[in-house]
Image: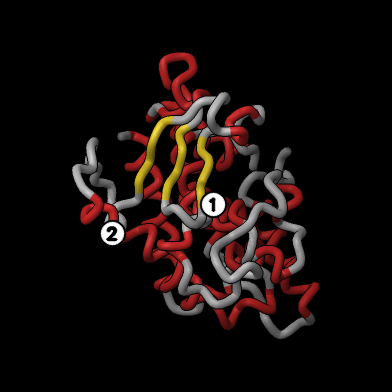
Amino acid sequence: RDTILWTSRYAASAHNFLYEDDSEKTAAFIGWFGVSNMNKAQYIRQEIHDPIYYLGSGAKYYVADLEDLDDTLVIGCGSARNTEDCRKRGTVFVANKLSNTIVVCPVHFFNNGAVASDAAEQESVTAWRSQRTLVPAAGFALLHEMTHITAVVDDFEYWKDGLASTDVAYEPSECIKLPDMGQINNAQNYALFALDVSANPEYAGKQVDVRGDEDDKWQFAVSWLRNGVGGRKEQP
């Protein structure tokens, strides 16, 4: 249950941040989504972060009939035997775009579910705030997977596959350097944006001078984000 609560918190942070005036001119938006996508800020809020946010944090532990599935995102347990992607090191969840389901991998339960604990989420936020280092936590991972679910985010017209986000890059140091269209198609960028505005709100919200060329705007945005941790770059 902690995982769903934290996913909801991250989505709420992104929703609230993008609801503010001129959010498209902020360091967080330009850094994670690109200068050429500034005109899509409210669309990203309405079609991606809002649907995840409005799912809420409630949970049904058993879905009795198919009628319930229309308004339910099904999250169920998997194993390395029946879910190939669960064999990948560190994989906590696997989303199926078309079946509106997310599989929870065994990693979620290792060490008494440490990666899914409130302490793990706090550690993740603290590590990002103080070092810009991404520490695995289940709430962050579930937000990432939510952007893969077609039934949740399929109204966004800029998906390259016409369905939902894809996985182009995972490491923050790579995600932040993707081309603009790659950034708004990459699931991890949405999760990292939500983490940044949650953990680093002062610098994430810094306004970027938009009078320069596109490269200058992006460089200024990333500099502001890194200033919050003494200039450290995103790790790994």
At horizontal 53% and vertical 41% (from top left) the residue drawn is 94
At horizontal 51% and vertical 41% (from top left) the residue drawn is 141
* Label annotation for residue 70: 2
Question: Which residue is the extreme one toward the front?
Answer: 66
- Asked if the residue under mark 1 is in contact with the one under mark 2, i.e. CB atoms within 8 Å, the reply is no
Q: Is residue 132 above or below residue 200?
A: above
Quadrant (top left, top right, bottom left, bottom right) of the C terminus:
top right
Amino acid on which the number 1 mark rests in the picture: Ala
Amino acid on which the number 2 mark rests in the picture: Asp
At horizontal 38% and vertical 36% (from top left) the residue drawn is 76
- In the image, which is nearer the foreground, mark 2 or mark 1? 2
Q: Nearer the viewer, residue 53 or 107?
A: 107
Q: Which residue is mark 1?
A: 191
Residue 151 percent across, percent down from the top left? 41, 62
Residue 38 percent across, percent down from the top left? 60, 78
Residue 50 percent across, percent down from the top left? 38, 65
Residue 138 percent across, percent down from the top left? 47, 35
In the picture, measured across the screen, residue 185 lies left or right of residue 101, that is right
Say what secondary structure mark 1 lies in. helix
Q: CA distance from mark 2 to mark 1?
A: 25 Å
In the picture, measured across the screen, residue 91 lies left or right of residue 108, that is right
At horizontal 46% and vertical 38% (from top left) the residue drawn is 103
Q: Nearer the viewer, residue 144 or 224?
A: 144
Say what secondary structure mark 2 lies in. loop
Q: Is residue 91 above or below residue 15?
A: above
Decide which of tag 2 and tag 1 comes sooner along the chain: 2
